Every structure is written in C-alpha cells, then in structure tokens.
Image (cartoon, rainbow, N blue to C red):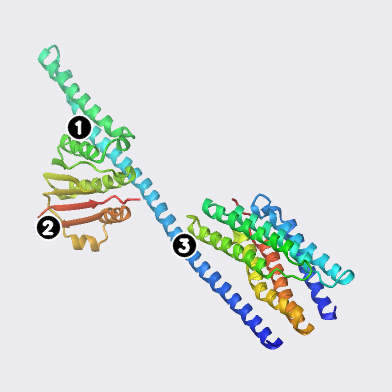
Amino acid sequence: MSYYETLLTIYLSISFICCSIVSSQYHKYKHTPLKLAPAILWLGFVTEFSATLYSNYIEVYNGWIFNGYTFFFYLLLYILVLRYLKNIRFKITTVLLGSAALLFFVYRFFSTGLYNDRFIYANAVLILVFLISCAMYLAELLQRPTQLEFRKHPEFFLLGGYLIFHLIYTPLSVAYDQELRIFSSEFYITLISIQSYILIAMNLLFIYIFIWTRKAHL
Amino acid sequence: MDEKSTLIIVLVSVTILLLLVVIVAVLFSVFIKRKNSLLTEQQDAQKRFEQEIAETQIEIREETLRNISWELHDNIGQLLTLAKIQTQNAGSDQSMLDEAAATIGKGLTEIRALSKLINPEALNTLSLTEALELELERFHRMAYLKPTLTVSGSPIAIDKKIEVIIFRVLQEFFTNTIKHSKATTLLVDVSYSDSLLEVIAQDNGVGFNYTEARAKNGIGLTNIESRGKLIGAVIAISSQDGEGTRLRLTYKPQKL
C-alpha cells in the first residue's frame, strides 16, 4: 500500500468513525426510523476497517468482505425506506423489489466465485431498487398535504447521500472490474481516490446533517 | 480499450450521474418550495376566513344587542309606560283596567319575540331564510318600513359559517337602509336554483351615488364587498340618487 493510499484510508476511516459517533450521539431521532442510521454507519466503518486489516495482513483481495457488507447494508437501507413510506402500495413494491434484489444477490454470492467477483450486476440491481424506492419516497413527500421542512427530514439527506454515492459507485465498480484484469496500479489509485473523496464528502455531509436537523415529530 | 479512455468514460459517467442527481434535487426543491408556498397561502386564507367568521359573529351579537336596546326603549318600554298610565288612571273602571291588561299582553308578546333575538344559538340553528324572516319581522314590528320576503326554489346545502357571513352582509345592507335611505319598503327575494343561491334586496329610499361612496371607501360597502369576496360570492350593489338601492348576491357552493 502506497503512502497516498494509506493517507486516503486514514482520512476515510476518520470520516467514518466521526460520522458513526455523531449519529450514535444524536438521540433526537431515536423515536424515528432514523434510529437505524447508526447501525448502517457503524457497519460501514467496521467493514472498511476490517477490509483494510484483512488486505494488509491476510490477503490482498478483500472484495468478499465488501460483498457481505453490501447485503446487510442494502437490507438495512430498504428497511429504513420502508419505515418512512406511508403509502401501502409503495411499501408493498419496496418489499417485493427489495426481497427480489437481495435474493438475487444471495444467489450470485453462492453461485459465483467469492474471491474474484465484484457482483456488478447484483449491485446494479440493488442500487436500481434503492433508486426506485427513493423515487417513491420523494413522490410521497410531494403528495403529502403538509409543509415539508428539510430541517426536520434528515432521512432525505441520508438517503440522498447514499443514493449519490452508490450511483457514482456503479461506473466505478465496472472500471474496478476491468482494472483487476488489465490496468495499472495508477488507474486503480485514481478510481480509489474518486471513491474515497466522495465517501469522505458524504460522511461530512451526514455529520453536518445530524447536527443541523431538528427533532422530527413523526 | 486503453487506460486513458476507460478513465475518461468513468469520469464522464460519474459527472453525468452527479449532474442528473443535482438536476433531480433542484427540481424537487423547486416543487417542494411551490407546494409549501401554496400550502401557506391556503392556511393563510383559512386563517383569514376563520378570523372573519369570528368578527362577523361578534358584529351580529353587537347588532342584536343594539336591536334589543332599541326594542326595549322604543317598543316595550313605551308599552309598559302606557300600561302604567292606564292602571294609574283606571281607578275602579274595569274597561280601563282591561285596556291596561291588553297593553301588558302586547308587551309580553313583544318580549317573547325579543327573546328569540337574544338566544345566541338562534343563528346557528336557524336557516338563512328563517333568520331573514325574523329580521324582517322585527322591522315590521318596529314600524321602520314595510318589508317583504319571497323565497323560491328548494334550499341548497350551504356551510353554516358561510350562511352566517351572507346573513351579516344582508344585515349590513338592511341597517344602512334603515339608517340612511328613508325607505318605506324593503323587498328581499331569495331564490335557489341549480346549486346557486341568489338574494336580491331592494329598497325604495333616497339612494346614493355608488361611485362617490365607493371612492370614499365607506366601511359598510367595503365590509359587504370584502366579505362577499371571502366566501366566493358575487355581490353587485347598484344605486342612484333618488332611485333606491339594490343589492344582488349570488353564491355557488364550492364542491370539495
């Protein structure tokens, strides 16, 4: 691991741990579905940390750790969106699509090589379902006969942040897959840099949102 | 495909996706902003309406108290005074005592009629035409002028709050007629047709120059027009010097 990569990993870990701590400290959301947020964030930190350790001390390829993380991350994320949705049709759609996407992911997990597959298709399906459920949530927000105050809707930013990151990650994951086969380490570092900076920016946004938003009354 | 072109494709894809997300976020916030301002306007309108209803109810109560005061002083008070004089002068004359008893009886009838006005629930329980009938009957009893009420068609369902405002608009018109017009007759025609209420009130008084009065921003006219606007009713007042005054109110209940 180069000096630059180490530095990036440190920054990333700091942003992850800070975000997780801040999310755990803010009890103003404990009565809302957002109480799942600390679990999602801590899961990210633990995954990043263990993947770095695994890569440095056991084996270079740590993709399976991220694949395992992806399953639980999306499971929690779908539950989060599901709890925020009020329209019964949207709820049923999310449950059906989410279950199908997760089942497809599990199928891929067991049917392809764990150590050399980045689950591009399975990831794309998961992000697509997440995108659809977010769109349903936005549509529901627009339909509600009450005023929407962004400051009382931290979930809007949390879901938006994850959506942005995972949408951007999709072309990156395709490139990662190429890189594993043919490209140089410089190319890999460029991809890692883009991903890390976006993740750091997302974590900083989450920290700000957790502090800035007001207690929501659901 | 070489490294450079792959990197360019990745960067372009990332940028396009980011831009798409930004566009969606901007559009969403614009929609939310519009929705919020629309909701604020609706809430403000509702608040104004509730406030106007409250003010109208207070005005109706004040008007009622004023009417009671007039009736006590000009009507019942006079009758009781007359009865007092009659009993004082009667001595042992039975016919005079009967006259005094008849006067007291008349006074009692007036008091009973008055009690209908005092009942605060009266306007809430009465329909618009019943309330108008009561009001016009009072004008007749007090000999202010000769009122006539005609009702045609089957009454349509109108929100009670709106009926209160319509009644208050008409009451304001009647008060102006009695106070300023020197009219001897007042015709009120209420007609219901095809989910539409039309009320025409017309007096034969001295009239006034509507354009001048409107320019002076008379409170009575302003109140009548602003209240009509508030409930979505169309109000047309027409008057000329020496030709009486006519008010036409049309209201179509909005379907929710």
> Foreground residue, A5 or B102?
A5
Q: Give percent across and percent down for residue A211.
A: 69, 62
| Secondary structure of residue under mark 1 | helix
Q: Quadrant of residue A80?
A: bottom right
Q: Compared to B46, does B83 lie above or below?
A: above
Residue at the location (75% across, 77% down)?
A: A192
Q: Amino acid at mark 3?
A: Lys
The CA distance from mark 1 to mark 2 is 32 Å
Q: Compared to B31, does B202 lie above or below?
A: above
In screen coordinates, is A135 left or right of A25? left
Give the residue number, with chain letter if any, for mark 1. Answer: B75
Mark 3 on the same chain as mark 2: yes
Q: Earlier in the sequence, mark 3 or mark 2?
A: 3
Q: Compared to B45, does A6 lie above or below?
A: below
Give the residue number, with chain letter if any, for mark 3. Answer: B35
Q: Compared to A154, does B76 lie above or below?
A: above
Residue at the location (63% across, 78% down)?
A: B14
Q: Give percent across and percent down for residue A217.
A: 60, 51
The CA distance from mark 1 to mark 3 is 58 Å
In screen coordinates, is B10 left or right of A92? right
Of circles 1 and 3, the one toward us is 3
Q: Amino acid at mark 2?
A: Asp
Q: Amino acid at mark 1?
A: Asn
Give the residue number, with chain letter if any, for mark 2. Answer: B241
